């Protein structure tokens, strides 16, 4: 259709010479945006979803990117651009004449000067998530936030309290997943724009400021941890997000309003619960308490170590324990199963109950203390326990 404009991030990235892995285009059409998007999807066999029927916004999903079709706001493209968040995102290109930029708000100049500058305070107030997005885009693009804009971000930040938690968490996750994100999140916290979601009294800023360094130092020595940090605890986020959040706060419960997944919340609770243990002299831990620690933290032990190092625990104190976790044959971190719960039930004619778990735990403790070493000695040990209980 004519006219059809490309606007937003893709235009900005073309000006900057950036080439994202996925192509995400925002297209603005004067009319029938949803109908045109549907027709386009059908023609090319692509996915199609209506994002907003009222505002006429639809998405076409392609193998290597997305096309968002939106109906123009106002009488012309300039009216539409006037409703956007920042000048760098308010530049349009007419697809039939790509050599022409439409830039009514000086976005090209701000891009040249690497500035995040608002178009109007009202635009931020209409969608307060744009406040957090300013810090994220500054981190992503290595820009600075223009001071007048920053003052309005602070002034209007109360509006973030009314934004849905999942939208806030998406922006936080983006911010924590990019190289300069921690610095810019620290700036946002210093500016108190996230006071509703991350109140000052729960923050450990000094520890958080060291988390990227802790991650880097561990990866430099143990490249096998790359998979650990990159694993997804839920569909949307990798493990680095809850690890960094754990370094940022002193209370996992305080983050519940953000709506983290059950798995992420379990990591947060575990890291903050066992962090004081890693602040002690770990080398003094005897085999049984060490086994107990590994059993309780096995799924996230490197995350616990990372946050501890960021908090000032010497790397030399954590290193031997991390290496035990990394060794799949370590008898304390990963004890071999000499006998299973099902075998115990069958051999001793026991019904399913918590007692089975207690017996398994007794076997592992005896194994760690060197009292047993194979299946037969484990069975004899269990016989002795059960005879005493008769």
Image (tube, grey):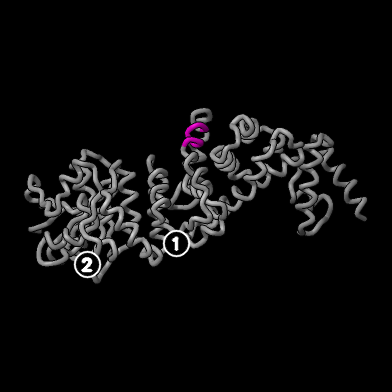
Residue for point 84% across, 38% down: 377
Q: Is residue 73 left or right of residue 52?
A: left
Image location (x, y in percent) of residue 189 = 42, 52
Residue labelled with disc 1? 196
Q: Is residue 220 left or right of residue 28?
A: right
Q: Which mark is residue 56?
A: 2
Please, what secondary structure does the residue beneath circle 2 have? loop
Mark 1, Cα crowd under 10 Å, few <14 / some 14-19 / many 20+, is some
Q: Name which residue lies at 52% across and 60% down.
A: 256
Image quadrant occupied by the N terminus:
bottom left
Q: Depth-wise, is mark 1 or mark 2 nearer the camera?
A: 1
Residue 326 visible at all: no
Query: Dividing the picture into quarters, in which one does residue 306 lie?
Result: top right
Foreground of the two, 366 or 197: 197
Q: In the rendered image, which quarter contains the C terminus? A: bottom right
Determine the CA span between mark 1 and mark 2. 32 Å
Residue 237, horizontal then vertical, whole percent: 44, 50
Specify the segment rendered in magenta.
Answer: 213-218
**Which residue is at 82% across, 36% downward?**
372
Which SS does the magenta portion mostly show? helix
Whole-percent x, y for residue 53 in the image: 25, 70
């Amino acid at each position: 259709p004519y006219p059809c404009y490309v606007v937003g991030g893709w235009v900005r990235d073309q000006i900057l010479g950036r080439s994202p892995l996925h192509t995400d285009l925002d297209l603005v059409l004067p009319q029938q945006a949803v109908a045109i998007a549907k027709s386009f999807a059908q023609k090319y066999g692509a996915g199609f979803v209506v994002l907003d029927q009222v505002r006429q916004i639809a998405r076409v999903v392609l193998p290597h990117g997305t096309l968002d079709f939106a109906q123009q706001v106002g009488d012309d493209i300039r009216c539409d651009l006037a409703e956007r968040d920042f000048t760098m995102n308010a530049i349009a290109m007419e697809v039939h004449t790509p050599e022409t930029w439409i830039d009514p708000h000086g976005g090209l100049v701000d891009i040249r000067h690497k500035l995040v500058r608002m178009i109007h305070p009202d635009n931020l107030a209409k969608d307060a998530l744009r406040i957090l997005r300013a810090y994220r885009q500054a981190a992503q693009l290595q820009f600075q936030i223009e001071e007048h804009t920053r003052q309005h971000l602070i002034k209007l930040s109360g509006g973030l309290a009314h934004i849905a938690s999942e939208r806030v968490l998406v922006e936080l996750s983006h911010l924590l997943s990019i190289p300069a994100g921690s610095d810019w999140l620290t700036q946002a916290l210093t500016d108190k724009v996230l006071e509703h979601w991350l109140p000052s009294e729960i923050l450990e800023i000094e520890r958080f400021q060291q988390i990227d360094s802790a991650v880097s130092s561990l990866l430099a020595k143990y490249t096998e941890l790359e998979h650990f940090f990159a694993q997804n605890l839920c569909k949307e986020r990798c493990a680095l997000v809850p690890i960094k959040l754990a370094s940022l706060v002193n209370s996992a419960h305080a983050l519940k309003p953000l709506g983290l997944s059950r798995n992420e919340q379990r990591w947060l609770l575990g890291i903050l619960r066992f962090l004081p243990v890693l602040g002690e002299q770990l080398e003094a831990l005897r085999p049984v308490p060490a086994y107990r620690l590994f059993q309780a933290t096995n799924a996230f032990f490197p995350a616990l170590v990372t946050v501890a190092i960021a908090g000032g625990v010497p790397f030399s104190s954590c290193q031997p324990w991390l290496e035990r976790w990394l060794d799949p044959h370590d008898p304390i971190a990963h004890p071999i199963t000499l006998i299973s719960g099902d075998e115990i039930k069958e051999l001793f004619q026991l019904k399913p109950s918590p007692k089975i778990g207690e017996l398994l735990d007794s076997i592992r403790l005896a194994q760690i203390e060197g009292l047993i070493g194979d299946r037969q000695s484990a069975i004899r040990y269990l016989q002795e326990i059960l005879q005493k209980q008769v």
